[in-house]
């Protein structure tokens, strides 16, 4: 019987993630003893497998969020919070096709057409997603173009900068780790999450286009699956880079989301109204517009 693939990647000074093809994952504290050399101190060099690669990638996300777990905010959901999330969704989507194409052309120059082709395909798939967020904002009665021109949520800025920076690197492999991190988290959202947001939004308007598309119901689940297969097919040094960046992106994402979630509804409304230069048709959710029900925290 063929031996199961085992992969490992060191993601912090003293933690490596180890994953087997069978789906088992460990976090390994680095350091051997005098008698025993740490077998995971060296870089992996073997082939990947989908089962072990997904273990490494998801392990990296879990580890990235672990540090913030105790500080994680769990605010009541509000329309103001959803509008902020949609503005963030716009900003994390608007430059994605351009950035991915830039990275693709670099991989063409480097003689890696298979990586370039993968990134070009992703650029095509991601095209127009910023428009979904704008349509959702419009459906909520918010002038989306004006809002996003004047407002980028503070916690989202480092995330956008990270992706911009990764895509212009000489060897932009990390952009795959960043994308995986965002898409994997989006794909965790279920139909019930979307229904809760719909219930919070006024009337019959469709304001969950972006959320649906970036959830288990939309294309995100397929994107995640394709990325796992692709990363598993890469040489070991590339898989290491992707997993390390998935961890770094998860740290930035966890801090950024939390920064936004810690804001009060009044602070969010104030920020939004300042950016728009006009009052929003939404007041505090204690007297929500049209008396809608409130649902679970929407995170676009
Ligand atoms: Fe997208
Ligand atoms: Fe996607």
Image (spheres, grey):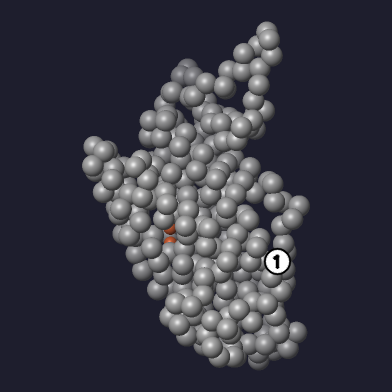
Task: Find the residue positioned furthest to the top.
Answer: 35
Determine if residue 111 is in view: yes
Secondary structure of the residue carrying numbered label 1? loop
Q: Which residue is drawn at 41% across and 55% down?
A: 164
Q: In this view, does 39 lie to the left or right of 286?
A: left
Q: Does the residue labelled 1 lie within 8 Å of ligand 1?
A: no
Q: Which residue is drawn at 28% across and 43% down?
A: 107
Determine if residue 232 is in view: no
Tell which of 258 and 131 is nearer to you.
258
Residue 156 is situated, as x and y percent measured from the top left of the image, at 54, 63
Residue 296 is situated, as x and y percent measured from the top left of the image, at 68, 70
- Quadrant location of ligand 2? bottom left
Mark 1 crowdedness (10 Å alpha carbons): few <14, some 14-19, many ≥20: some
Tell which of 128 and 165 is nearer to you.
165
Q: Is residue 95 left or right of residue 244?
A: left
Residue 232 is situated, as x and y percent measured from the top left of the image, at 42, 36
Tell which of 56 and 218 is nearer to you.
56
Residue indicated by mark 1: 262
């Amino acid at each position: 019987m063929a031996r199961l693939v085992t992969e490992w990647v060191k993601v912090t000074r003293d933690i490596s993630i180890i994953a087997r093809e069978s789906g088992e994952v460990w976090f390994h504290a680095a350091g051997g003893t005098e008698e025993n050399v740490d077998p995971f101190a060296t870089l992996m060099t073997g082939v990947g497998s989908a089962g072990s690669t997904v273990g490494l990638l998801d392990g990296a996300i879990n580890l990235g969020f672990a540090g913030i777990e105790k500080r994680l905010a769990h605010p009541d959901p509000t329309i103001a919070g959803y509008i902020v999330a949609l503005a963030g969704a716009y900003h994390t989507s608007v430059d994605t096709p351009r950035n991915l194409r830039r990275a693709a052309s670099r991989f063409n120059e480097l003689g890696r057409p298979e990586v370039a082709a993968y990134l070009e395909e992703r650029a095509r798939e991601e095209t127009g997603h910023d428009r979904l967020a704008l349509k959702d904002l419009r459906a909520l009665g918010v002038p989306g173009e004006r809002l996003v021109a004047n407002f980028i949520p503070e916690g989202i800025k480092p995330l956008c900068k990270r992706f911009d920076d990764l895509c212009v690197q000489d060897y932009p492999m990390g952009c795959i780790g960043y994308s995986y991190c965002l898409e994997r988290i989006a794909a965790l959202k279920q139909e019930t999450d979307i229904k809760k947001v719909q219930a919070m939004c006024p009337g019959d308007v469709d304001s969950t286009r972006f959320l649906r598309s970036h959830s288990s119901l939309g294309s995100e689940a397929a994107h995640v699956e394709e990325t796992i297969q692709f990363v598993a097919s890469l040489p070991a040094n590339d898989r290491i880079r992707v997993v390390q960046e998935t961890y770094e992106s998860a740290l930035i994402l966890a801090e950024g989301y939390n920064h936004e979630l810690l804001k009060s509804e009044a602070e969010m409304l104030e920020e939004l109204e300042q950016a728009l230069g006009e009052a929003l048709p939404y007041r505090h959710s204690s007297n929500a517009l049209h008396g809608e029900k409130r649902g679970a925290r929407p995170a676009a």
